Amino acid sequence: DGGITQSPKYLFRKEGQNVTLSCEQNLNHDAMYWYRQDPGQGLRLIYYSQIVNDFQKGDIAEGYSVSREKKESFPLTVTSAQKNPTAFYLCASSPSLGTQYFGPGTRLLVL
Amino acid sequence: AQSVTQLGSHVSVSEGALVLLRCNYSSSVPPYLFWYVQYPNQGLQLLLKYTSAATLVKGINGFEAEFKKSETSFHLTKPSAHMSDAAEYFCAVSVGGGADGLTFGKGTHLIIQP
């Protein structure tokens, strides 16, 4: 089956800890995106990548980092510098200049 | 920069009644416009999109939206609501095909009354 997978479904972070959220796609899409969703806030863009080994900051990149070593994978690290990480994180991918398709999301909670 | 305003964080309609969810956008260049639906604790599913072709766009599950440039609007409608339509709906805008990401509205929670 083609699609976008995100893991884990739920993730718990201790204070001062870095955590990494996984996003994999087998749609052969060039572009990949990370969004953060908070209640009543809609989705906000964190980082995006249009090609392998290249990525750009979105509107709320502070406290996050990404890598794009493979076309299929775009992991997001939530660093200890992100003081309010509790949110629902959504990964998306798209062909060049195409519609974005979303994964099922990861809910990050702080212990 | 572009922006999206969704009027009404919650909309309640009776089963079988007309659904109307409002979306207004601002963009300095011709936009691409999208409606997505989200069920609890799930990702977003594309309902429909406008990409400068026909102004009346038909989507999945009986939804449609009309692009009105003069009103900078892209309202979502469905003639007859079904209980399964209860969900969160997001309007989004992009420029240049969306390669730089989408700008989302804050969402409208659709409640269906039996």
Image: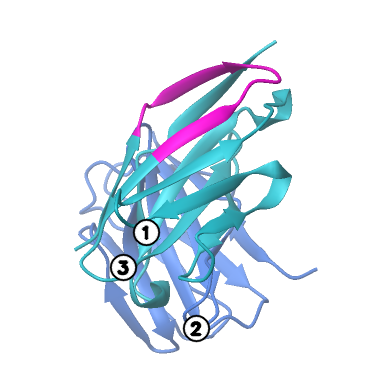
- Please state if A31 lies on the left or on the right of A14 as rendered: right
- Please state if B26 lies on the left or on the right of A109 as rendered: left
Residue at numbered disc 1: B93
What is the distance, in whole Å, between disc 2 and disc 1 at their CAs?
16 Å
Q: Chain A shown in which color?
A: blue
Chain under callout 1: B
Q: Position of residue B19 (x, y in %)?
A: 57, 29
* SS for callout 1: strand
Of marks 3 and 2, the one in the foreground:
2
Q: What residue type is labelled 3?
A: Ser
Q: How many marks?
A: 3
The residue stretch that appears in magenta: B7-22
- The residue closer to the viewer here, A92 or A12, is A92
* SS for callout 2: loop
What is the distance, in whole Å, between disc 3 and disc 1 at their CAs?
25 Å
Looking at the figure, which quarter contains the N terminus of chain A? Answer: bottom right
Q: Which amino acid does label 2 sit on?
A: Ser
Q: Position of residue B58 (x, y in %)?
A: 64, 54
Question: Is A26 rendered above or below residue A15?
Answer: below
User: For residue A45, what is the image quadrant?
Assistant: bottom left
- Please state if A97 lies on the left or on the right of B5 as rendered: right
User: Can residue A1 be seen from the camera position used here?
Assistant: yes
Q: Chain B shown in which color?
A: cyan
Tell me which secondary structure the magenta stretch mostly adopts: strand
Residue A96 bears which disc, if any?
2
Chain under callout 3: A
- Please state if B60 lies on the left or on the right of B13 as rendered: right
How crowded pointer 3 is (Cα within 10 Å; few <14, some 14-19, many 20+) is rated as some
Chain under callout 2: A
Q: Position of residue A61 (x, y in %)?
A: 24, 62
Question: Is A2 rendered above or below residue A29?
Answer: above
Residue A65 bears which disc, if any?
3
